[in-house]
Amino acid sequence: MNPYVLAVLLSSLGIGTTLTLASSHWLLAWMGLEISTLAIIPLMAQQHHPRAVEATTKYFLTQATAAAMILFASTTNAWTTGEWGIQEMSNPTALALITMALALKMGLAPVHYWLPEVLQGLDLTTGLILSTWQKLAPFALIYQISPMMNPSLMTMLGLASTIIGGWGGLNQTQLRKILAYSSIAHLGWMMIIMQYSPNLAILNLILYITMTSAAFLTFKNVASTKLSTLTLTWSKTPMMTTMAMMTLLSLGGLPPLTGFMPKWLILQELTKQSLPLTASIMALAALLSLFFYLRMCYAMTLTIAPNTNTNTSTWRQKSSQTTMILSITTTLALILLPITPAIMALTT
Protein backbone atom coordinates (compact mmCIF):
# COMPACT_ATOMS: atom_id res chain seq x y z
CA MET A 1 0.00 0.00 0.00
CA ASN A 2 1.17 3.53 -0.82
CA PRO A 3 2.71 5.07 2.35
CA TYR A 4 0.73 8.31 1.90
CA VAL A 5 -2.54 6.38 1.67
CA LEU A 6 -1.52 4.34 4.71
CA ALA A 7 -0.75 7.54 6.65
CA VAL A 8 -4.16 9.01 5.77
CA LEU A 9 -5.97 5.81 6.81
CA LEU A 10 -4.10 5.46 10.11
CA SER A 11 -4.61 9.14 10.98
CA SER A 12 -8.33 8.79 10.14
CA LEU A 13 -8.44 5.76 12.42
CA GLY A 14 -6.92 7.86 15.22
CA ILE A 15 -9.14 10.87 14.55
CA GLY A 16 -12.32 8.75 14.52
CA THR A 17 -11.55 7.13 17.86
CA THR A 18 -10.40 10.42 19.42
CA LEU A 19 -13.61 12.13 18.25
CA THR A 20 -15.71 9.46 19.99
CA LEU A 21 -13.57 9.61 23.15
CA ALA A 22 -13.92 13.41 23.34
CA SER A 23 -17.63 13.71 22.50
CA SER A 24 -20.55 14.16 24.86
CA HIS A 25 -23.16 14.26 22.04
CA TRP A 26 -24.49 11.11 20.39
CA LEU A 27 -24.19 12.42 16.83
CA LEU A 28 -20.51 13.29 17.28
CA ALA A 29 -19.84 9.92 18.89
CA TRP A 30 -21.62 8.17 16.01
CA MET A 31 -19.58 10.18 13.52
CA GLY A 32 -16.31 9.13 15.20
CA LEU A 33 -17.35 5.46 15.11
CA GLU A 34 -18.17 5.75 11.39
CA ILE A 35 -14.85 7.44 10.54
CA SER A 36 -12.82 4.72 12.29
CA THR A 37 -14.91 1.97 10.61
CA LEU A 38 -14.42 3.47 7.14
CA ALA A 39 -10.69 3.97 7.79
CA ILE A 40 -9.99 0.34 8.69
CA ILE A 41 -11.93 -1.18 5.76
CA PRO A 42 -9.21 -0.47 3.09
CA LEU A 43 -6.59 -1.84 5.53
CA MET A 44 -8.60 -5.05 5.85
CA ALA A 45 -9.12 -5.50 2.10
CA GLN A 46 -5.59 -4.55 0.99
CA GLN A 47 -4.51 -8.16 0.35
CA HIS A 48 -7.10 -8.59 -2.47
CA HIS A 49 -7.59 -12.15 -1.30
CA PRO A 50 -11.16 -13.59 -1.43
CA ARG A 51 -10.94 -14.43 2.30
CA ALA A 52 -9.90 -10.87 3.16
CA VAL A 53 -12.66 -9.37 0.99
CA GLU A 54 -15.22 -11.67 2.63
CA ALA A 55 -14.01 -10.66 6.11
CA THR A 56 -14.15 -6.97 5.14
CA THR A 57 -17.72 -7.33 3.84
CA LYS A 58 -18.85 -9.11 7.03
CA TYR A 59 -17.18 -6.45 9.16
CA PHE A 60 -18.74 -3.59 7.18
CA LEU A 61 -22.26 -5.08 7.42
CA THR A 62 -22.09 -5.72 11.18
CA GLN A 63 -20.59 -2.29 11.92
CA ALA A 64 -23.17 -0.57 9.70
CA THR A 65 -25.96 -2.44 11.53
CA ALA A 66 -24.56 -1.40 14.93
CA ALA A 67 -24.15 2.24 13.77
CA ALA A 68 -27.76 2.31 12.52
CA MET A 69 -28.95 0.93 15.88
CA ILE A 70 -26.95 3.61 17.75
CA LEU A 71 -28.43 6.34 15.56
CA PHE A 72 -31.95 4.96 15.99
CA ALA A 73 -31.61 4.58 19.77
CA SER A 74 -30.11 8.06 20.29
CA THR A 75 -32.83 9.60 18.09
CA THR A 76 -35.50 7.74 20.09
CA ASN A 77 -34.02 9.07 23.32
CA ALA A 78 -33.88 12.62 21.92
CA TRP A 79 -37.49 12.31 20.71
CA THR A 80 -38.81 11.20 24.11
CA THR A 81 -36.61 13.31 26.42
CA GLY A 82 -35.32 16.16 24.24
CA GLU A 83 -31.69 15.32 25.19
CA TRP A 84 -28.81 14.36 22.84
CA GLY A 85 -26.18 14.11 25.60
CA ILE A 86 -24.48 10.74 26.08
CA GLN A 87 -24.96 10.92 29.86
CA GLU A 88 -28.63 11.93 29.52
CA MET A 89 -29.95 8.53 28.42
CA SER A 90 -33.13 8.04 30.42
CA ASN A 91 -35.32 6.07 28.00
CA PRO A 92 -34.98 2.37 29.01
CA THR A 93 -35.75 1.04 25.49
CA ALA A 94 -33.17 3.31 23.86
CA LEU A 95 -30.64 2.39 26.55
CA ALA A 96 -31.10 -1.37 26.04
CA LEU A 97 -30.89 -0.92 22.25
CA ILE A 98 -27.73 1.16 22.44
CA THR A 99 -26.13 -1.35 24.85
CA MET A 100 -26.72 -4.17 22.36
CA ALA A 101 -25.45 -1.98 19.49
CA LEU A 102 -22.19 -1.28 21.34
CA ALA A 103 -21.93 -4.98 22.26
CA LEU A 104 -22.24 -5.78 18.52
CA LYS A 105 -19.56 -3.18 17.72
CA MET A 106 -17.11 -4.79 20.17
CA GLY A 107 -18.04 -8.42 19.58
CA LEU A 108 -19.58 -9.34 22.94
CA ALA A 109 -21.60 -12.57 23.18
CA PRO A 110 -24.36 -13.30 22.14
CA VAL A 111 -23.68 -10.95 19.17
CA HIS A 112 -20.08 -12.13 18.71
CA TYR A 113 -20.45 -14.39 15.65
CA TRP A 114 -18.76 -12.00 13.23
CA LEU A 115 -15.53 -11.54 15.21
CA PRO A 116 -13.77 -14.94 14.80
CA GLU A 117 -14.72 -15.10 11.10
CA VAL A 118 -13.54 -11.57 10.38
CA LEU A 119 -10.28 -11.91 12.33
CA GLN A 120 -9.50 -15.18 10.55
CA GLY A 121 -9.60 -13.41 7.17
CA LEU A 122 -7.13 -10.66 8.11
CA ASP A 123 -3.36 -10.50 8.36
CA LEU A 124 -1.90 -10.30 11.87
CA THR A 125 -1.19 -6.53 11.82
CA THR A 126 -4.74 -5.55 10.85
CA GLY A 127 -6.03 -8.19 13.26
CA LEU A 128 -4.05 -6.50 16.04
CA ILE A 129 -5.66 -3.12 15.21
CA LEU A 130 -9.12 -4.72 15.14
CA SER A 131 -8.58 -6.52 18.48
CA THR A 132 -7.16 -3.51 20.35
CA TRP A 133 -7.62 -0.01 18.90
CA GLN A 134 -11.12 -0.64 17.50
CA LYS A 135 -12.40 -1.60 20.97
CA LEU A 136 -11.56 1.79 22.51
CA ALA A 137 -14.38 3.93 21.08
CA PRO A 138 -17.33 1.57 21.90
CA PHE A 139 -15.76 0.88 25.31
CA ALA A 140 -15.59 4.62 26.06
CA LEU A 141 -19.31 4.96 25.25
CA ILE A 142 -20.20 1.97 27.47
CA TYR A 143 -18.09 3.53 30.25
CA GLN A 144 -20.08 6.78 29.99
CA ILE A 145 -23.53 5.17 30.00
CA SER A 146 -22.72 2.36 32.50
CA PRO A 147 -24.35 4.10 35.54
CA MET A 148 -27.69 4.13 33.68
CA MET A 149 -27.49 0.67 32.10
CA ASN A 150 -29.60 -2.30 33.14
CA PRO A 151 -27.46 -4.34 35.63
CA SER A 152 -29.08 -7.64 34.61
CA LEU A 153 -28.31 -7.00 30.92
CA MET A 154 -24.67 -6.17 31.70
CA THR A 155 -24.27 -9.26 33.88
CA MET A 156 -25.84 -11.42 31.15
CA LEU A 157 -23.49 -9.98 28.50
CA GLY A 158 -20.46 -10.44 30.77
CA LEU A 159 -21.23 -14.04 31.77
CA ALA A 160 -22.21 -15.10 28.23
CA SER A 161 -19.05 -13.56 26.75
CA THR A 162 -16.74 -15.20 29.32
CA ILE A 163 -18.32 -18.64 28.90
CA ILE A 164 -18.64 -18.53 25.09
CA GLY A 165 -15.18 -16.98 24.73
CA GLY A 166 -13.72 -19.91 26.68
CA TRP A 167 -15.86 -22.59 25.06
CA GLY A 168 -15.48 -21.36 21.49
CA GLY A 169 -11.69 -21.43 21.55
CA LEU A 170 -11.37 -25.02 22.83
CA ASN A 171 -11.36 -26.85 19.48
CA GLN A 172 -9.67 -24.20 17.31
CA THR A 173 -6.43 -24.74 15.44
CA GLN A 174 -6.17 -21.27 13.86
CA LEU A 175 -4.33 -18.77 16.07
CA ARG A 176 -6.38 -15.78 14.92
CA LYS A 177 -9.65 -17.52 15.84
CA ILE A 178 -8.20 -18.48 19.24
CA LEU A 179 -7.22 -14.83 19.83
CA ALA A 180 -10.72 -13.73 18.74
CA TYR A 181 -12.35 -15.98 21.35
CA SER A 182 -9.77 -14.79 23.87
CA SER A 183 -10.86 -11.22 23.07
CA ILE A 184 -14.54 -12.12 23.63
CA ALA A 185 -13.73 -13.68 27.02
CA HIS A 186 -11.68 -10.68 28.18
CA LEU A 187 -14.43 -8.27 27.13
CA GLY A 188 -16.82 -10.33 29.25
CA TRP A 189 -14.64 -9.68 32.34
CA MET A 190 -14.72 -5.95 31.56
CA MET A 191 -18.51 -5.89 31.15
CA ILE A 192 -19.22 -7.79 34.37
CA ILE A 193 -17.25 -5.31 36.51
CA MET A 194 -18.25 -2.12 34.63
CA GLN A 195 -21.34 -1.46 36.78
CA TYR A 196 -19.48 -1.91 40.10
CA SER A 197 -16.03 -0.47 39.40
CA PRO A 198 -15.57 1.24 36.00
CA ASN A 199 -11.92 2.03 36.81
CA LEU A 200 -11.20 -1.68 37.18
CA ALA A 201 -12.75 -2.23 33.75
CA ILE A 202 -10.37 0.37 32.28
CA LEU A 203 -7.41 -1.31 34.01
CA ASN A 204 -8.52 -4.65 32.52
CA LEU A 205 -8.77 -3.06 29.05
CA ILE A 206 -5.26 -1.57 29.26
CA LEU A 207 -3.73 -4.87 30.38
CA TYR A 208 -5.74 -6.80 27.76
CA ILE A 209 -4.42 -4.50 25.01
CA THR A 210 -0.84 -4.95 26.29
CA MET A 211 -1.01 -8.76 26.45
CA THR A 212 -2.89 -9.16 23.15
CA SER A 213 -0.40 -6.86 21.39
CA ALA A 214 2.46 -9.01 22.71
CA ALA A 215 0.75 -12.20 21.44
CA PHE A 216 -0.07 -10.80 17.97
CA LEU A 217 3.41 -9.30 17.51
CA THR A 218 5.05 -12.58 18.53
CA PHE A 219 3.02 -14.56 15.99
CA LYS A 220 3.79 -11.94 13.35
CA ASN A 221 7.50 -12.15 14.13
CA VAL A 222 7.57 -15.95 13.73
CA ALA A 223 5.12 -15.78 10.77
CA SER A 224 2.75 -18.27 12.37
CA THR A 225 -1.04 -18.39 11.93
CA LYS A 226 -1.76 -22.05 12.74
CA LEU A 227 -1.24 -24.15 15.85
CA SER A 228 0.78 -26.69 13.84
CA THR A 229 3.35 -24.12 12.68
CA LEU A 230 3.98 -23.07 16.29
CA THR A 231 5.82 -26.36 16.79
CA LEU A 232 8.61 -25.07 14.51
CA THR A 233 9.32 -21.89 16.48
CA TRP A 234 11.41 -23.24 19.37
CA SER A 235 14.30 -24.30 17.13
CA LYS A 236 14.37 -20.90 15.38
CA THR A 237 13.86 -18.48 18.27
CA PRO A 238 14.07 -20.29 21.62
CA MET A 239 14.10 -17.12 23.74
CA MET A 240 11.08 -15.57 22.00
CA THR A 241 9.24 -18.90 22.27
CA THR A 242 9.81 -18.93 26.04
CA MET A 243 8.56 -15.34 26.35
CA ALA A 244 5.55 -16.14 24.14
CA MET A 245 4.65 -19.10 26.35
CA MET A 246 4.69 -16.84 29.43
CA THR A 247 2.65 -14.18 27.62
CA LEU A 248 -0.03 -16.78 26.79
CA LEU A 249 -0.10 -17.92 30.42
CA SER A 250 -0.44 -14.26 31.42
CA LEU A 251 -3.44 -13.97 29.06
CA GLY A 252 -4.87 -17.01 30.83
CA GLY A 253 -4.50 -15.23 34.17
CA LEU A 254 -1.90 -17.33 35.98
CA PRO A 255 0.11 -15.84 38.86
CA PRO A 256 2.78 -14.44 39.18
CA LEU A 257 2.18 -12.83 35.76
CA THR A 258 0.43 -9.53 34.93
CA GLY A 259 -2.77 -11.21 33.66
CA PHE A 260 -3.56 -12.49 37.15
CA MET A 261 -4.01 -8.93 38.46
CA PRO A 262 -7.30 -7.90 36.76
CA LYS A 263 -8.93 -11.31 37.39
CA TRP A 264 -7.94 -11.23 41.06
CA LEU A 265 -9.21 -7.65 41.56
CA ILE A 266 -12.47 -8.31 39.66
CA LEU A 267 -13.26 -11.49 41.63
CA GLN A 268 -12.45 -9.62 44.85
CA GLU A 269 -14.82 -6.76 43.87
CA LEU A 270 -17.61 -9.18 42.89
CA THR A 271 -17.27 -10.91 46.27
CA LYS A 272 -17.43 -7.52 48.03
CA GLN A 273 -20.67 -6.81 46.14
CA SER A 274 -22.18 -10.05 47.60
CA LEU A 275 -22.11 -11.86 44.25
CA PRO A 276 -20.30 -15.12 45.11
CA LEU A 277 -22.19 -17.16 42.47
CA THR A 278 -21.26 -14.74 39.66
CA ALA A 279 -17.64 -14.71 40.85
CA SER A 280 -17.57 -18.53 40.92
CA ILE A 281 -18.99 -18.81 37.38
CA MET A 282 -16.44 -16.26 36.12
CA ALA A 283 -13.55 -18.13 37.77
CA LEU A 284 -14.69 -21.46 36.29
CA ALA A 285 -15.16 -19.88 32.85
CA ALA A 286 -11.57 -18.58 33.07
CA LEU A 287 -10.44 -22.22 33.29
CA LEU A 288 -11.94 -22.86 29.83
CA SER A 289 -9.81 -20.08 28.38
CA LEU A 290 -6.77 -21.31 30.29
CA PHE A 291 -7.12 -24.73 28.64
CA PHE A 292 -6.60 -23.43 25.10
CA TYR A 293 -3.75 -21.14 26.20
CA LEU A 294 -2.06 -24.19 27.75
CA ARG A 295 -2.70 -26.08 24.51
CA MET A 296 -0.86 -23.36 22.58
CA CYS A 297 1.99 -23.39 25.11
CA TYR A 298 2.24 -27.17 24.81
CA ALA A 299 2.37 -27.02 21.00
CA MET A 300 4.94 -24.24 21.11
CA THR A 301 7.40 -25.51 23.72
CA LEU A 302 6.85 -29.21 24.42
CA THR A 303 6.33 -30.81 21.00
CA ILE A 304 8.70 -31.51 18.16
CA ALA A 305 7.37 -31.26 14.62
CA PRO A 306 8.25 -34.38 12.55
CA ASN A 307 9.89 -32.33 9.79
CA THR A 308 12.27 -30.16 11.79
CA ASN A 309 15.85 -30.52 12.95
CA THR A 310 15.97 -31.34 16.66
CA ASN A 311 19.02 -29.12 17.20
CA THR A 312 18.88 -25.36 17.50
CA SER A 313 20.54 -23.64 14.55
CA THR A 314 24.15 -22.62 15.05
CA TRP A 315 23.54 -19.57 12.82
CA ARG A 316 20.43 -17.61 11.98
CA GLN A 317 19.63 -14.93 9.45
CA LYS A 318 19.11 -11.61 11.18
CA SER A 319 15.42 -10.68 11.24
CA SER A 320 14.56 -7.39 9.56
CA GLN A 321 11.45 -6.89 11.72
CA THR A 322 11.49 -4.31 14.50
CA THR A 323 11.08 -5.90 17.91
CA MET A 324 11.08 -2.84 20.17
CA ILE A 325 7.26 -2.75 20.61
CA LEU A 326 7.21 -6.53 21.07
CA SER A 327 9.88 -6.28 23.79
CA ILE A 328 7.99 -3.53 25.66
CA THR A 329 4.57 -5.24 25.50
CA THR A 330 6.01 -8.64 26.47
CA THR A 331 7.83 -7.13 29.46
CA LEU A 332 4.66 -5.35 30.62
CA ALA A 333 2.63 -8.56 30.10
CA LEU A 334 4.91 -10.45 32.48
CA ILE A 335 6.11 -8.30 35.38
CA LEU A 336 3.39 -5.86 36.50
CA LEU A 337 1.84 -8.01 39.26
CA PRO A 338 4.08 -6.63 42.10
CA ILE A 339 2.74 -3.09 41.55
CA THR A 340 -0.87 -4.22 42.21
CA PRO A 341 -1.14 -2.24 45.52
CA ALA A 342 -0.22 1.00 43.69
CA ILE A 343 -2.78 0.25 40.96
CA MET A 344 -5.44 -0.56 43.58
CA ALA A 345 -4.80 2.85 45.16
CA LEU A 346 -5.36 4.49 41.76
CA THR A 347 -8.54 2.54 40.88
CA THR A 348 -10.37 2.99 44.20
Image (cartoon, grey):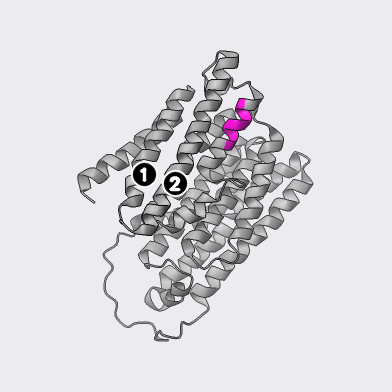
Q: Residue at x 78, y 40 (%)?
A: 274
The residue tagged 2 is 59
Against 340, is 69 above or below? above
Q: Residue at x 59, y 22 (%)?
A: 89
Q: In the orientation shown, which residue stands out farthest toward the top?
A: 82
Q: Residue at x 42, y 52 (%)?
A: 55
Residue 152 in percent (x, y) is at: 71, 37
In the depicted view, which residue is nearer to us: 230 or 245? 230
Residue 258 shows in this picture:
no
The three-letter amino acid code for the residue at tag 1 is Ile
SS for dot 2: helix
In the depicted view, which residue is nearer to us: 267 or 119? 119
Residue 26 in percent (x, y) is at: 49, 24
What stretch of residues is rendered in magenta? Answer: 94-100
Residue 220 in percent (x, y) is at: 38, 62
Against 130, is 198 above or below? above
Residue 101 shows in this picture:
yes
For the C terminus, the quadrant is top right
The three-letter amino acid code for the residue at tag 2 is Tyr
Total labels: the figure holds 2
Against 132, is 150 above or below? above
Q: Is residue 95 magenta?
A: yes
Residue 38 picture quarter: top left
The residue tagged 1 is 40
- The reply to whether callout 2 and callout 1 are in contact (CB within 8 Å) is yes
Label 1 CA crowd tier, 10 Å (few <14, some 14–19, many 20+): many
In the displayed structure, does residue 35 sit left or right of residue 7? right
